[in-house]
């Protein structure tokens, strides 16, 4: 998501509030994603498109050793910082999500999550090299996907399908999406 098209101002505030208890975000997407991620105890996790910090705080509550969030919206990043508080094991960055994550070292995260962010990008394919570069060998990238309905209407429909890419010996190996 380009910084100039990110959720800002009142729209960002609305999204942050709605994502806390909204039926899709709180009761469908997050539970499904955490079920797939499994035990995160001791893991270093990167949350691309961290929004208002819902995943960041839950990952820490579930035992992640370190969580780094990256978000294109200054408004959502403010909400994330407020939600995180003074947790020294969490860092959040304001960054254009369609640009390389050059400020993050390669092979530094055990898990990369990208929740509900694909549909905001013009160039989704540019993100996967960033994700796999950031993962340690055999690390995992988990991401929800938006799909186009069979009618071809062009309306993105969120699903509970997760695309998985696992880095093995330095090579990104795409796996079949897992439906939940």
Image (cartoon, rainbow, N blue to C red):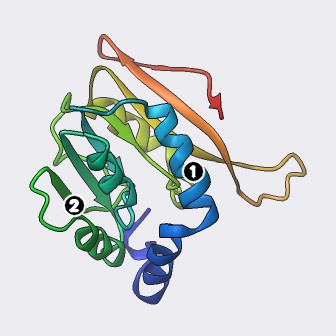
- Find the residue positioned furthest to the right: 151
The image quadrant where one finds the C terminus is top right
- Residue 127 location, quadrant: top left
Give neighbour class at mark 1: few <14, some 14-19, many 20+ (Cα, 10 Å). Answer: many
The secondary structure type at the circle numbered 2 is strand
Which quadrant of the rendered structure holds the N terminus?
A: bottom left
Residue at horizontal 36 percent and vertical 50 percent from the top: 48
Residue 158 appears at what percent x and percent y?
67, 53
Residue 7 position within the rendered picture, expressed as x and y whole percent measured from the top left: 45, 76
User: Which numbered marker is on residue 29?
Assistant: 1
Residue at the image position 29 percent from the left and 70 percent from the top: 77
Of the numbered discs in the image, which one, if any, rests on residue 93? 2
Horizontal side of 22 relative to 126 (left or right) equals right
Res 69 → quadrant = bottom left
User: Which element type, helix, strand or loop, lies under badge 1?
Assistant: helix
Picture coordinates of residue 115, whole percent (x, y)? 48, 50
Asked whether 92 or 55 is in front, the reply is: 55
The residue under the point 25% across, 40% down is 63
In the foreground, 10 or 5: 10
**Furthest-bottom residue in this view:** 10
The percent coordinates of residue 32 (x first, y second) are 56, 42
For marks 1 and 2 on the same chain, the one whose residue lies earlier in the sequence: 1
């Amino acid at each position: 998501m380009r910084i100039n098209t990110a959720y800002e101002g009142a729209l960002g505030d609305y999204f942050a509030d709605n994502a806390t208890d909204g039926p899709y975000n709180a009761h469908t997407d997050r539970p499904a994603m955490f079920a797939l991620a499994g035990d995160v105890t001791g893991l270093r996790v990167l949350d691309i498109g961290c929004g208002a910090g819902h995943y960041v705080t839950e990952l820490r509550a579930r035992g992640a050793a370190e969580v780094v969030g990256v978000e294109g919206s200054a408004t959502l990043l403010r909400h994330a910082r407020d939600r995180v508080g003074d947790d020294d094991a969490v860092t959040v960055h304001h960054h254009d999500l369609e640009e390389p994550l050059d400020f993050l070292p390669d092979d530094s995260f055990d898990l990369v999550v990208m929740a509900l962010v694909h549909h905001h990008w013009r160039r989704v394919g540019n993100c996967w090299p960033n994700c796999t570069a950031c993962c340690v060998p055999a690390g995992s990238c988990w991401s929800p996907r938006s799909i186009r309905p069979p009618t071809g209407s062009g309306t993105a429909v969120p699903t509970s399908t997760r695309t998985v890419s696992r880095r093995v010996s330095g090579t990104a190996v795409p796996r079949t999406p897992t439906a939940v």
